[in-house]
Amino acid sequence: MHPFLAADAGRPRAIAHRGGRHGGPENTLPAFAAAVALGYRHLETDVHATADGALVVSHDPTLDRVAGRPGPIAAMTAAEVAAVRIDGDVAMPRFEELLDAFPTAHLTVDLKHDGAVAPMLALLARRPALLERLCLGAFSDRRIAAVRGAHGRRACTAAAPREVLRMLAGVRLGRRVRVAAADVVAVPERWGGDGVDPDRGPRVADARFLARAAEAGVAAHVWTVNDPDRMARLLDLGAAGLVTDETARLRDVLVSRGAWS
């Protein structure tokens, strides 16, 4: 088992999605600080790269939604991004700022763009101890392959899109599934043709899928689960971790089950 997962073996992981929605704007240090203050050891975030190769914490490829700043992050310098204020007064952190602000936290990281891969690999080459604290994923087989090619099993990686599809097909056909290169499989509860909606579309994180993931030795983390009843149901079905915006709610659910530590 990868060190990223070993510390929580046997207990469901509570993972704060972009830091959670109650401590500050998403993907900012105040949001992550609020989750850590609640006792969260796992944080989920996203990274893009600036024009000069700095990794910054952002879900979107632009700052238009969160800061009213048009234009792609990839066309801005790190200094230009640092001058932007989210919701008028909160800075967007560099990825290394986030790492250093919470040195004991484990981070699930979505590589949002091909341009983020080389800076991430350079960071891991410079600070190899981070390999024990990070689990890297992407909606791109190519990005995942690049991480594995550079670091092999020393890197904790999520199943790539094609691996997830193969798992889903195997589960539906009643076959055993194997994801030899992945440590985690991250899936939504349901996934409809028009996107992710917890109330619509075929169920992905059902009892069969979660059981097959456990048999294959990969930790199934379900995103993004904000309703306490759904949290409890997925935990009952065997989800290894839940990603949530509602950090206090998930903590309360886990406390009530004796599964918070």
Image (spheres, rainbow, N blue to C red):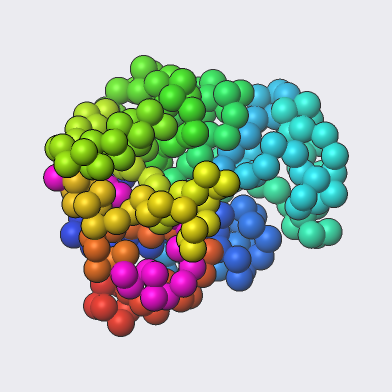
Q: Is residue 203 left or right of residue 120?
A: left
Whole-percent x and y of residue 238? 23, 60
Residue sitting farthest toward the bottom: 256
Q: Quadrant of residue 133?
A: top left
Q: Is residue 14 left or right of residue 73?
A: left
Q: Nearer the viewer, residue 94 or 243?
A: 243
Q: Quadrant of residue 87?
A: bottom right
Q: Is residue 162 magenta?
A: no
Q: Is residue 10 visible?
A: yes
The residues colored magenta run 215-233
Rendered-image quadrant of the N terminus: top left
Q: Is residue 1 left or right of residue 191?
A: left
Rendered-image quadrant of the C terminus: bottom left
In the image, is residue 195 above or below residue 243?
above
Q: Residue at x 48, y 34 (%)?
A: 138
Whole-percent x and y of residue 127? 44, 31
In the image, is residue 129 above or below residue 118?
below
